Image (cartoon, rainbow, N blue to C red):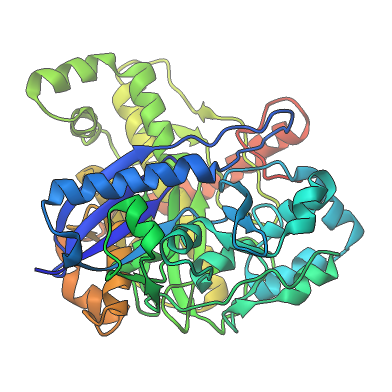
Amino acid sequence: MQYLLAIDAGTGSVRAVIFDTLGNQVSVGQREWTHLAEEGVSNSMSFDFDANWILVCECIGDAVQSAKIDVEEIIALSATSMREAIVLYDKDGKELWAVANVDARADKEVKFLQEHFEGLEEQFYAQSGQTFALGALPRLLWVKNNRPEIYEKLACISMIGDWVLARLSGVIASDPSNAGTTGVFSLQKRDWMQSMAKDVGLKNEIFPPVLEVGTTMGYVTQVAAEETGLSTQTQVVMGGGDVQLGSAGLGVVKEGQVAVLGGSFWQQVVNIPSQSEAPKDMSIRVNPHVIDGLSQAEGISFFSGLMMRWFRDAFCDMEKIEAKQRGIDVYEVLEEKASSIPVGSHGIMPIFSDSMKYGKWYHAAPSFLNLNLDPEICNRSSIFRSLEENAAIVSSINLDRIKAFSGVEFNEIVFAGGASRGPLWSQILADVTGYKVKIPQVSEATALGAAMAAGVGANVYKSLESAAEQLVVWEKTYEPNMENKKLYDEIKQKWQKAYEVQLKLVDDNITTSMWKAPGL
């Protein structure tokens, strides 16, 4: 038997997942990791590469042991990771410094670049699809200003997934989907734009080779084999960013295909040609896809899943008791009760995530509008439904914007992540958008995407597209109720107007923003 190993380096944990070549998950090893604030550095979130490498090795060992297989049967491996997170190396390939994706220490550097290089962010965004807020340039500038001894030694930069592969193969390289999130990258050329670093006074010869996803980098080194227990006969294959490889694991590999990823944050991604121009208003993020020739326009909704968890834990003790008695998940109980609430949830309007405004990204204070004092109307069930409707509405607004600037037409959505397990939420997404919603069977789409990449490198699959066609299976489809869509269209317009007023309260220092991008 032959197997493929995927290493998924996420924000909160790292996992090693073993698949057979038919796409069946065989085993998994997982460790949570913590990204600690650096002492005296506000909003910092460092990545401890020494401690975290030990966790990666432990995950691999657990997965192999659980699978009860010989390591020689693992013919190839690849990695995927949280995007934006970076690792800096010296000339010998030794790690110097690293941060997780949520590190926001460089807010002053973001402001400096915006104020001293007028129009440069817009110019770079047109080429890269990224703004400064989450990019690598402000972070590199922070290192230059605050850690000059590290900056002097800096010889190379990579992403976290690349770091995993470098540890395993001894080769530092990156791929377009992950490297693209640095903002120092061309969407159309799918390669670094070294001149961007030079334009702001930074080193410009620190960018490693760019390899397309599925390219073989080498084999597990002897040192890595001793540390992980893997075989030196296992190929190491270039992986990519978690959202983009997750899209591949969901079968979203062709132009015009769409996915809504319903996790802690929600992402709305649409496959567009690489030659597409980014929107002039900088409202939407654009990333290189893992498929050569494609980019992904990406909208992001903040905290859509996390606010559900907050609501559950803060208000739904009775439903938790009922769920335990019935032996089902508490969200099933909540959805059952919310299904009897009419479209629009009696007018309740949640104010949490705004639709995406990438160029100037901040949110209103969390709140509910239009609450009613009648407990038969305003209760846990109606508020729960309003939260589900709101997540779908924000997703719909982001998809509308992507369609408007890209000209790409679509009529169906692949819905995945924890939210897709809710039949009411899936139907609401179909009704709000007016698109067919398809639910895949796979529960580990990101890891499966990385396994596909490994399989391409090992010639198990001809390409990521053919692997997706072979491995992705559909569980259920939801058709939109177009009468409900008419009602939701009206609600969507009212919500957008209400959100503008709520943002004004933040601007006037009356309420506190739920989140602001660095530099605002």
Q: From this viewpoint, is residue 520 visible?
A: no
Q: In which quarter of the image is the C terminus?
A: top right
- Residue extending farthest to the right is 116
Q: Is residue 495 left or right of residue 440?
A: right
285 versus 300 height, above or below = below
Residue situated in front as seen by the camera: 208 or 267 = 208
Q: In this view, does 151 lie to the left or right of 55?
A: right
Q: In which quarter of the image is residue 5?
A: bottom left
Q: Visible in this render: residue 100?
A: yes
Q: What's the residue at 51%, 55% (across, down)?
A: 160
The answer to which of 451 and 403 lies nearer the viewer is 451
The image shows residue 195 at horizontal and vertical percentages of 77, 76
Residue found at x 67% / y 60%:
90
x and y percentages locating residue 461 in the rendered image = 23, 80
Judge from the rendering whether residue 236 lies leftward or rightward of residue 326; answer left or right. Answer: right
Query: Quick check: 443 above or below 464?
Result: above
User: How many labels, in total?
Assistant: 0
Question: What residue is shown at x 39% (from left), y 75% (from top)?
Answer: 218
Q: Quadrant of residue 472?
A: bottom left
